[in-house]
Image (spheres, helix red, strand yellow):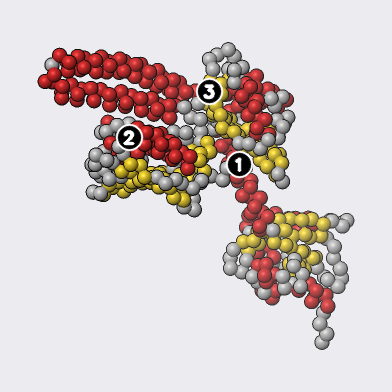
């Protein structure tokens, strides 16, 4: 018997081909059903195809098929639904059916292809869009997107109206109208930042907005250019109200200034009195020396407190830092301050990170701490730089007694805020926050022979 050429061609087709009677009974199915659904063609012969359709889709598919074949004029319809596989799973099919029939076919042809990947991707995209919409309508932050030259508003959430006191419709009509709410003194900086975003640079800044003559509100803005084929096509970002943080920072600075002013004046009085006592009563020189030394240590702590307040309150963000130059400057500073000490440093290889400017002060603090706590009259401190795949490491090694656990916990971050009252000073807190705000971390190894403190800072490609 000769092979049926049409049957051979159908068996090699990618789409599943069915021949159905009016009630949906299968009279023919090609071999494509095997890779698509796991059935052999004979498994479906004589069965009603609607019994294999997902219960939630079966009635819709049955009605679509019935309505199609009932039409007098030619009609072709496409329908999507879930079809059961041989192992009980479900696959999405797109089936094309018509009312065209032929005496030789004695049935209606339905061709189907697997669209599971597309339907799943669309579902995931719709779910993500729904979640993004929910987030954008519930968050107090302003989420926004403009085209590359700020001539068209592509998206902004309702939080814009609450924060800026202006309408979204007004912003849509004039995408630059938000500048009218920017404090006049800050407007040039904002416009310059917008130009940099259009040129492909990222944005991280704070500025003031004024609403209806009321007091200024501070906002923090981060923006990111969206680049396609080397060109900026959109600009997206968020704006957050940080007025409360700014207010607390101002209050903290005022209190700090008052305390430091009073502390400096009172300690100078104490030191002057101690000098007078030492001159009048030479026998008390040893005791007055303790008073003077303690007072000067307190003055030094007050200055470190100033640096700490600046670090916490002034947030210029992270900037590119050349660690080799940073280490050279820090070592030179300490060598000048402590000529009797040896700082063993032979230079480092060029390495760049994105970090806080206070990192140099942090390295100086570690070196001075090692020298002042050394057991020797001629202290020796070693500084080394090493690179890993992801980080640059700076290690300060000394011969001082083991760092007390409470001090080590400050450096590594394993502390409660109340621990500050139990540490010997605030210098180590300056080190910790400088590294932490640079996205780095610190490890401490202490033995009877000395300490090894390592600052690990992530590489940058900038």
Q: Earlier in the sequence, mark 3 or mark 1?
A: 1
Where residue 11 sits, quadrant-wise, is bottom right
Drawn side of residue 226 relative to residue 387, left or right: right
Q: Is residue 345 above or below residue 237?
A: below
Q: Is residue 72 above or below residue 223?
A: below
Let me know if residue 126 appears in the view: yes
Q: Earlier in the sequence, mark 2 or mark 3?
A: 3
Q: Are marks 2 and 1 in contact (CB under 8 Å)?
A: no
Residue lying at 83% horizontally and 75% vertically, measured from the top left? 6
Quadrant into which the N terminus falls: bottom right
Mark 2 or mark 3, which is nearer to you? 2
Drawn side of residue 206 relative to residue 291, left or right: right
Name the residue beneath numbered marker 3.
Answer: 218
Q: Earlier in the sequence, mark 2 or mark 1?
A: 1
Residue lying at 70% horizontally and 74% vertically, measured from the top left? 41
Q: Position of residue 128 (x, y in %)?
A: 60, 45
Q: Position of residue 167 (x, y in %)?
A: 65, 23
Q: Position of residue 51 (x, y in %)?
A: 65, 64
Q: Position of residue 333 (x, y in %)?
A: 39, 34
Q: Furthest residue to the left?
A: 283
Q: Is residue 203 above or below residue 442?
A: above
Name the residue beneath numbered marker 1.
Answer: 130
| Gap in angstroms between the C-alphas marked 2 and 3 | 44 Å
**Disc number placed over residue 374 in the picture, else none:** none
Q: Are marks 3 and 1 in contact (CB under 8 Å)?
A: no
Q: Furthest residue to the front?
A: 339
Residue lying at 83% horizontally and 78% vertically, measured from the top left? 5
Q: Secondary structure at mark 1?
A: helix
Let me know if residue 433 appears in the view: no
**Disc number placed over residue 338 in the picture, else none:** 2
Q: Secondary structure at mark 3?
A: strand
What number of labels is visible?
Answer: 3
């Amino acid at each position: 018997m000769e092979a049926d050429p049409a049957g051979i061609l159908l068996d090699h087709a990618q789409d599943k081909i069915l021949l159905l009677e009016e009630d949906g009974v299968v009279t023919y199915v090609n071999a494509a059903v095997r890779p698509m659904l796991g059935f052999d063609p004979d498994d479906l012969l004589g069965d009603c195809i609607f019994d294999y359709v997902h219960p939630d889709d079966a009635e819709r598919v049955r009605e679509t098929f019935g309505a199609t074949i009932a039409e007098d004029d030619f009609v072709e319809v496409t329908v999507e639904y879930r079809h059961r596989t041989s192992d009980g799973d479900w696959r999405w099919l797109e089936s094309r059916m018509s009312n065209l029939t032929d005496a030789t076919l004695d049935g209606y042809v339905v061709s189907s292809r697997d669209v599971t990947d597309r339907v799943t991707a669309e579902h995931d995209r719709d779910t993500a869009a729904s979640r993004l919409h929910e987030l954008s309508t519930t968050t107090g932050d302003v989420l926004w997107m403009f085209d590359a030259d700020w001539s068209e508003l592509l998206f902004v959430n309702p939080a814009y109206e609450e924060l800026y006191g202006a309408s979204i419709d007004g912003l849509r009509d004039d995408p630059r109208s938000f500048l009218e709410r920017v404090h006049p003194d800050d407007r040039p900086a904002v416009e310059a930042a917008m130009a940099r975003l259009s040129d492909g640079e990222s944005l991280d800044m704070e500025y003031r907005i004024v609403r209806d003559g009321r007091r200024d509100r501070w906002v923090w803005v981060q923006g990111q250019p969206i680049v396609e084929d080397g060109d900026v096509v959109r600009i997206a970002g968020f704006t957050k109200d940080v007025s409360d943080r700014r207010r607390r920072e101002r209050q903290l600075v005022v209190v700090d200034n008052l305390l430091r002013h009073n502390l400096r004046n009172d300690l100078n009085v104490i030191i002057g009195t101690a000098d007078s006592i030492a001159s009048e009563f030479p026998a008390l020189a040893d005791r007055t020396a303790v008073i003077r030394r303690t007072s000067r240590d307190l003055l030094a702590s007050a200055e470190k407190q100033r640096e700490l307040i600046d670090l916490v309150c002034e947030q210029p963000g992270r900037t590119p830092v050349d660690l080799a130059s940073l280490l050279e400057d820090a070592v030179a500073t300490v060598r000048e301050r402590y000529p009797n000490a040896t700082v063993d440093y032979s230079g480092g290889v060029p390495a760049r990170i994105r970090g806080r400017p206070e990192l140099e002060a942090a390295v100086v603090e570690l070196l001075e701490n090692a020298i002042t706590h050394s057991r020797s009259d001629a202290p020796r401190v070693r500084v080394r730089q090493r690179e890993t795949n992801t980080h640059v490491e700076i290690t300060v090694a000394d011969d001082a007694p083991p760092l007390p656990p409470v001090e080590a916990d400050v450096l590594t971050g394993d502390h409660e805020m109340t621990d500050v009252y139990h540490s010997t000073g605030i210098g180590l807190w300056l080190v910790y926050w400088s590294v932490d705000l640079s996205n780095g971390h610190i490890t401490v190894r202490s033995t009877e022979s000395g300490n090894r403190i390592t600052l690990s800072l992530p590489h940058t490609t900038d």
